[in-house]
Image (cartoon, rainbow, N blue to C red):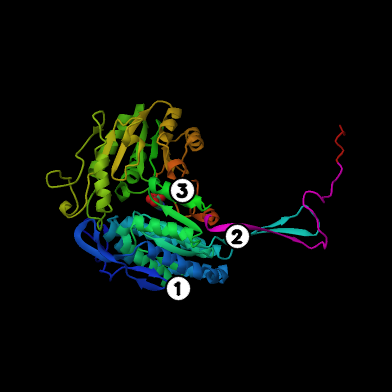
Amino acid sequence: MSGDRSGNVIPRAAPALRGLVTSVIDGAPVPGGRTLPSTNPARLDEVVGEVSFGDASTFVRAAESAKKAQEEWATIPAPIRGRAIAHIGRLIEENAEALARLVTAEIGKPYSEALGEVREIIDTCDFFLGEGRRLYGQTVPSEMPDKQLFTFRRPVGTVAVITAGNFPVAVPAWYIVPALLAGNTVVWKPAEYSAVSSAAFHELFVRGGGLPDGVFNVVQADGPATFSGLKQSLEAGLVDKVGFTGSSAVGREIGALTGRHLQTACLELGGKNPLLVTPSADLDLAVEGALFSGFGTAGQRCTSLGTVIVHASVHDQFLARFNAALAGARVGDPTHDVLMGPMLDAKFAERYEEFLGWVQPHHAVQAAYGRITKDNPRDRFVGDPSTGLYYHPMVVDGVRLGDRIFMEETFGPIVGVTTYQSLNEAIELANAPGYGLSSSIYTTDPKDAFTFRDKISAGMVSINNSTSGAEAHLPFGGNGKSGNGSRQSGVWVLDQFTRWQAMNWDYSGRLQKAQMDIIELAPDTTFRL
Ligand code: UN1
């Protein structure tokens, strides 16, 4: 670590170029038919690594390998699997800076955020290493004498995990750590544009955990090949559970596919996360929260702020301070201390350009927007904008119910602002887009806070805090278009990767029939004082 001129902490060196990244099945690298570079979105001419992509059959092979390894992995006692998770956590900790540098280089996330993301893997390991010594079942009284009831958690079997690249290492850990701990084996398909970070993650897991071959396989493939490989694997009975983080549209497809196989996928989808600013709010705190929620990871978190819903009486003050804070924020090279860097990848930049076309005449945009160029510059840009996929962060005031910017997820550095008169109206606006991942309210009135918590559709609620930045041991997940009610993290995710088994043990030596052979005590129902 060293300091730059402004005293900010910056990484020492650029990440080293890694060798060819391939799928890894049954412990062996499996090159595919097509090799493409993964580039740095902040310096498009910098290749972070070459990636060899497989096809649907690669996915099926990986699922076969996971299936073959599962029974033996499940026989390793849970406390020993917990120790493996502990060792993985320690190895990640030893490699935290190198992994964070790689994440910054490959997806352009500011280094401090990337380091936080790596911390989230360590937190997840810290939580689950102890779960290896719990994985509690219950002993339950029976309705009959000389009979005892028990519950056991059993692994689901083979888990397919398909993740996005905006959190290329933390979100995969949310699935993979509890899945392995609970005795499942894994096939992981990371995002194409974060393949090099995912290869590093995979290597750290396999080496740190001493994982036997086939327990954790990684498949480098594009979306259509993955979907077809997953379909074939489900048909062949090779996959027992799917975890997916990505768009609501693909989530629906995965949900339909798994539903046909009588499975429920663990779906973590998009969001249009609202942030309410009430008249009693500390406005500076709300501005700080909105700035981080809206523009951290350049607005490309599923928990990113979508729309600020501000009380009409404080709208002008809030907006003026929000715009001023945004104008003063540092944007640029993500290896420096900046609020935001570039878009994750060209595909996201292209899609974001489409969202920009949703700005309408009744919207008010205070400053320059669109791609940052020499002709469309950003004051105090850190570095050279022409080298990367840099966009102006923007605030769109006057968005209304029904506007596309108001209703749909706009993955990128754009935040809408609208006003309300009554809290009920604000909550209706907050729920209107039909997502339900994260939400936030800034208020000093407990009644507002609890009413909001009660009525908001979101799975996650912040009071006086940003919509993003969930901690790794609270349930993470959404409702509506944000997911199917599944929850990740903490003890709650165990229900995704285990199935309850109920056991009864009758030691009476007779057939005691439930509901029939039961002792009745005679109540005196006519007694009165
Ligand atoms: C995501 O964007 O998919 O709460 C996950 C947060 C992070 C995780 C975001 N801890 O913003």
Q: Is 291 on the left or on the right of 73, as rendered?
A: left
Given this view, does label 3 or label 1 mark the residue nearer the observer?
A: 3
Q: Position of residue 70 (x, y in %)?
A: 52, 68
Q: Counting residues from the N terminus, which is met first, the one under dot 3 or under dot 2?
A: 2
* Label 2 crowd (10 A; few <14 / some 14-19 / many >=20): some
Q: Position of residue 41 (x, y in %)?
A: 24, 56
| Residue 529 visible from this viewpoint | no
Q: Counting residues from the N terminus, which is met first, the one under dot 3 or under dot 1?
A: 1
Q: Residue at x 78, y 49 (%)?
A: 515
Which mark, residue 213?
Answer: 1
Given this view, does label 3 or label 2 mark the residue nearer the observer?
A: 3
> For residue 309, which quarter of the picture?
top left
Which mark, residue 153?
Answer: 2
Q: What span is colored magenta in the figure?
A: 496-522
The three-letter code of the residue at mark 1 reads Asp
In contact (CB < 8 Å): disc 3 and disc 1:
no
Given this view, does label 1 or label 2 mark the residue nearer the observer?
A: 1
* Label 3 crowd (10 A; few <14 / some 14-19 / many >=20): some
Residue closer to the observer: 23 or 418: 23
**The N terminus - image quarter:** bottom left
Which secondary structure lies at badge 1? loop
Residue denoted by label 3: 256
In magenta stretch: residue 244 = no
Measure the alpha-carbon separation of dots 3 and 1: 31 Å
Q: Residue at x 46, y 41 (%)?
A: 480
Measure the alpha-carbon separation of dots 1 and 2: 24 Å
Q: Position of residue 220 (x, y in %)?
A: 34, 63
Q: Position of residue 148 (x, y in %)?
A: 74, 59
* Label 1 crowd (10 A; few <14 / some 14-19 / many >=20): some
> For residue 403, which quarter of the picture?
top left
The three-letter code of the residue at mark 2 reads Arg
Which secondary structure lies at badge 2? strand
